[in-house]
Image (cartoon, rainbow, N blue to C red):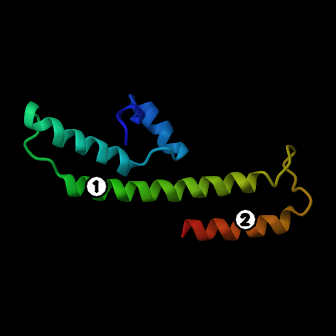
């Protein structure tokens, strides 16, 4: 990951993660690399739990992907209902298909 693509604020990081442009794993790897590079000079860290950090980041990235997929499916289901809250033509069969897909993603 390039330094110029790293978010400068927590808000930017959150936005990039929600949009799928950034994962927890990528962000943690970037900062671990920075620690490895700069800590011999700065001597800022006594202990770095690299493996534990990567495992936690991987779990969070997996959870974020699952949640993002679920939200995308919910948005697809919402498009089957018109502005008055009524089901559109053919939306019952489409809804059944979408709900089956949503259940698969949620499991």
Q: Is residue 101 above or below residue 65?
A: below
Residue placed most toward the observer, 90 or 83: 90
Q: Is residue 54 left or right of residue 46?
A: right
Residue 94 screen position, x and y as percent: 81, 65
Q: Quadrant of residue 46?
A: top left
Residue at 64% from the left image edge and 53% from the top image edge? 72
Q: Nearer the viewer, mark 1 or mark 2?
A: 1
Q: Secondary structure under badge 1?
A: helix
What crowding class fits label 1: few (fewer than 14 Cα within 10 Å), some (14-19), or many (20 or more)?
some
Residue at 45% from the left image edge and 58% from the top image edge? 63
Q: Which mark is residue 54?
A: 1
Residue 43 shows in this picture: no
Residue 82 screen position, x and y as percent: 86, 48
Q: Is residue 75 left or right of residue 31?
A: right
Q: Is residue 66 above or below residue 24?
A: below
Residue 100 shows in this picture: yes
Residue 16 screen position, x and y as percent: 49, 39
Residue at 60% from the left image edge and 71% from the top image edge? 104
Q: Which mark is residue 98?
A: 2
Q: Quadrant of the C terminus?
A: bottom right
What crowding class fits label 2: few (fewer than 14 Cα within 10 Å), some (14-19), or many (20 or more)?
some
Mark 1–mark 2 Cα distance, whole angstroms, equals: 34 Å
Residue at 64% from the left image edge and 65% from the top image edge? 102
Q: Secondary structure under badge 2?
A: helix
Q: Are marks 1 and 2 in contact (CB under 8 Å)?
A: no
Q: Is residue 94 above or below residue 79?
A: below
Residue furthest to the right in view is 89
Q: Quadrant of the N terminus?
A: top left
Q: Which mark is residue 32?
A: none
Residue 100 screen position, x and y as percent: 69, 71
Residue placed most toward the observer, 89 or 24: 24
């Amino acid at each position: 990951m390039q330094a110029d693509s790293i978010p400068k604020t927590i808000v930017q990081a959150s936005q990039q993660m929600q949009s799928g442009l950034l994962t927890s794993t990528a962000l943690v790897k970037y900062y671990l690399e920075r620690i490895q590079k700069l800590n011999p000079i700065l001597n800022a860290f006594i202990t770095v739990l690299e493996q534990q950090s990567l495992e936690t980041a991987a779990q969070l990235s997996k959870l974020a992907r699952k949640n993002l997929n679920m939200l995308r499916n919910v948005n697809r289901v919402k498009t089957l209902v018109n502005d008055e809250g009524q089901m559109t033509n053919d939306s019952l069969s489409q809804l059944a298909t979408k709900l089956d897909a949503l259940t698969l993603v949620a499991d």
